[in-house]
Amino acid sequence: MELKTFNELKVEDLFDSNTFLNKHFLYCNRSGCNSKIANKGVAKKVFLQGECDLKLPPTKSLNKDAPSATVSNFNPDNESPPFYWSLEDMMKFENIGFSNTVDNLKYLICADCELGPLGFRLTKNETCFIAADRVTYKLN
Ligand SMILES: [Zn+2]
């Protein structure tokens, strides 16, 4: 299974230019985990403003038993993703986990190794946002 990081791909190849939906499967960023997060065509490319334009904390695994393999080509200090993938609700995911509610949001984490935050969900509605550079991509 070949996975590519955000930095290995061209942004314009990640989404359909008409629908803005993701063209590739989304996977966990941690090598050795690679849990599937979402199928193609379920997540829409969005830029966030206002209350949603928050700084994401650095990614770490919340699960002490998770494999200790390094996360490849990943910049843990990138608090502001280039864009987000918006998913209507958690039923659109294949696998996703939630952290505890912090202020008015829940952080999204890998359901298997608990790497996160990969994105967030505001508590006032169902929409979930995944940071485009905090997941890996499987082509076809
Ligand atoms: Zn994982």
Image (spheres, rainbow, N blue to C red):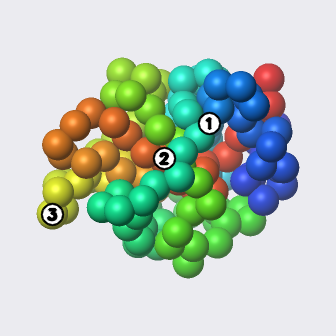
Residue 130 numbered tag: 2
Say whether marks 2 and 3 touch (CB < 8 Å).
Answer: no
- Residue 104 position in % (x across, y down): 17, 57
Tag 2 secondary structure: strand
- Residue 37 on image: x %, y %: 52, 34
The CA distance from mark 1 to mark 3 is 27 Å
Amino acid type at circle 1 is Leu
Q: Amino acid at mark 3?
A: Asp
Q: Which mark is residue 26?
A: 1
**Above-or-below relation of 116 to 138:** below
Mark positioned earlier in the residue sequence (2 or 1): 1
The kind of secondary structure element at disc 3 is: loop
Residue occupying image coordinates x 43% and y 45%: 129
Q: Are marks 2 and 1 in contact (CB under 8 Å)?
A: yes
Q: Residues within 10 Å of mark 2 (few under 14, many from 20)?
A: many
Mark 3 residue CB less than 8 A from any atom of ligand 1? no
Image spot of residue 38 (x, y percent) = 54, 29
Towards the viewer: 52 or 118: 52
Establish if 68 lies above or below 43. below
Q: Quadrant of residue 98?
A: top left
Q: Earlier in the sequence, mark 1 or mark 3?
A: 1
Q: In the image, what residue type sits under mark 2?
A: Ile
